[in-house]
């Protein structure tokens, strides 16, 4: 086989892989896996019994809520993420139907199995409505805090599911996840500068600039990591929680590359993939080290 033929095959393979990743990102399958990965991390670090049901519930709820959000944000995405907007216009209704079926199935599943707190499964939908239609996303920095708070509900929901919502480990993970998602949400706005300005939405990047945003986000990332170390040092948390520092390292590694010209795979796969990375790392550590 000639070098030219090998290069051509490699390009085709890369092109095919990129196409698959784009579908996973634009369809919200990947972000749903990432959100459900927080369930895995919470169960492992809080030493809760393995159970696939909360994983499925979080995946289904995220799939539906984020797909609804894609439709409400379609005008901004025409400028910010035109490829995603085109995907939603062409295939969005199919994925919305899939998300709706999964969401309803998760609710029915929870009712049938008498899962605690079934009513709270409506909270994410209400949050999506508040974010997109009531106008929370137009409030400076509040939108980022809102997204962080929404993701913080995942560890709390897992704790509630197991009847241990007030355990310190669960509460810490809720605060930690909320803080880190807030940082990620601010970084995500870097790619949306042009579209947000056109829609009259003030964000940290389009107000202070991408460079300042990256610097402050990195400082916040370091402060969260330092807080983790300090809490573990007091003995309140087990040293196994120090595995979260790898997560801070992952975030710290992508922040310098967050620029407006980065494509959807950087933000939708690298940034959104942070919690999948953490869950895999935690599971590996649990099998090999702990």
Image (cartoon, rainbow, N blue to C red):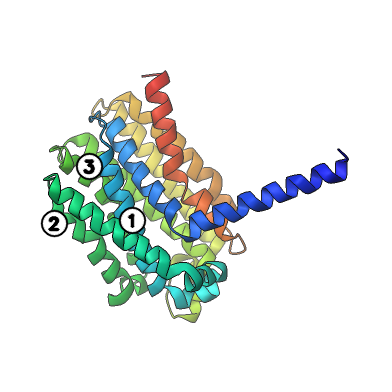
Q: Which mark is residue 203?
A: none
The residue lying at 24 percent from left, 52 percent from top is 106
Element type where label 1 sits in the image: helix
The residue identified by callout 2 is 119
Viewer-side residue, 99 vs 32: 99
The mark nearer the N terminus, 2 or 1, is: 1
The residue identified by callout 3 is 158
The residue lying at 25 percent from left, 35 percent from top is 51
As measured in the structure, the alpha-carbon distance from the residue carrying label 2 to the one carrying label 3 is 14 Å
Element type where label 2 sits in the image: helix
Which mark's residue is nearer the viewer, 2 or 3?
2
Check contact, mark 3 vs mark 1: CB within 8 A.
Answer: no
Element type where label 3 sits in the image: helix
Residue 144 in view in this figure: no
Image location (x, y in percent) of residue 148: 33, 55
- Compared to 79, does 122 lie above or below? above
Image location (x, y in percent) of residue 9: 76, 46
The mark nearer the N terminus, 3 or 1, is: 1
As measured in the structure, the alpha-carbon distance from the residue carrying label 3 to the one carrying label 1 is 15 Å
Which mark's residue is nearer the viewer, 3 or 1?
1
Viewer-side residue, 267 vs 82: 82
Image location (x, y in percent) of residue 258: 56, 56
The residue identified by callout 1 is 62
């Amino acid at each position: 086989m000639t070098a030219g033929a090998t290069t051509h095959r490699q390009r085709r393979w890369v092109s095919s892989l990129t196409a698959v990743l784009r579908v996973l990102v634009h369809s919200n399958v990947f972000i749903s896996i990432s959100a459900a990965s927080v369930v895995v991390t919470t169960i492992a670090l809080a030493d809760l019994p393995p159970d696939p049901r909360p994983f499925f519930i979080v995946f289904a709820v995220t799939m539906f809520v984020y797909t609804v959000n894609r439709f409400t944000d379609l005008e901004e995405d025409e400028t910010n993420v035109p490829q995603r907007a085109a995907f939603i216009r062409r295939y969005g209704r199919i994925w919305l139907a899939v998300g709706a079926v999964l969401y309803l199935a998760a609710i029915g599943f929870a009712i049938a199995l008498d899962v605690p707190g079934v009513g709270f499964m409506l909270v994410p939908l209400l949050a999506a409505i508040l974010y997109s239609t009531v106008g929370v996303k137009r409030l400076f920095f509040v939108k980022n805090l809102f997204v962080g708070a929404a993701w913080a509900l995942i560890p709390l929901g897992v704790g509630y599911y197991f009847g241990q919502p007030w355990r310190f480990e669960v509460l810490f993970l809720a605060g930690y996840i909320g803080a880190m998602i807030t940082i990620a949400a601010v970084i995500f706005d870097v790619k949306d500068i042009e579209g947000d300005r056109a829609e009259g939405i003030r964000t940290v990047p389009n107000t202070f600039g991408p460079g300042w945003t990256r610097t402050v986000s990195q400082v916040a990332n370091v402060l969260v990591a330092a807080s983790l170390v300090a809490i573990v040092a007091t003995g309140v948390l087990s040293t196994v929680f120090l595995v979260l520092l790898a997560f801070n390292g992952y975030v710290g590694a992508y922040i310098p590359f967050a620029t407006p010209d980065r494509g959807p795979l950087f933000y939708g796969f690298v940034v959104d993939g942070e919690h999948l990375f953490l869950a895999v790392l935690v599971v590996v550590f649990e099998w090999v080290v702990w």
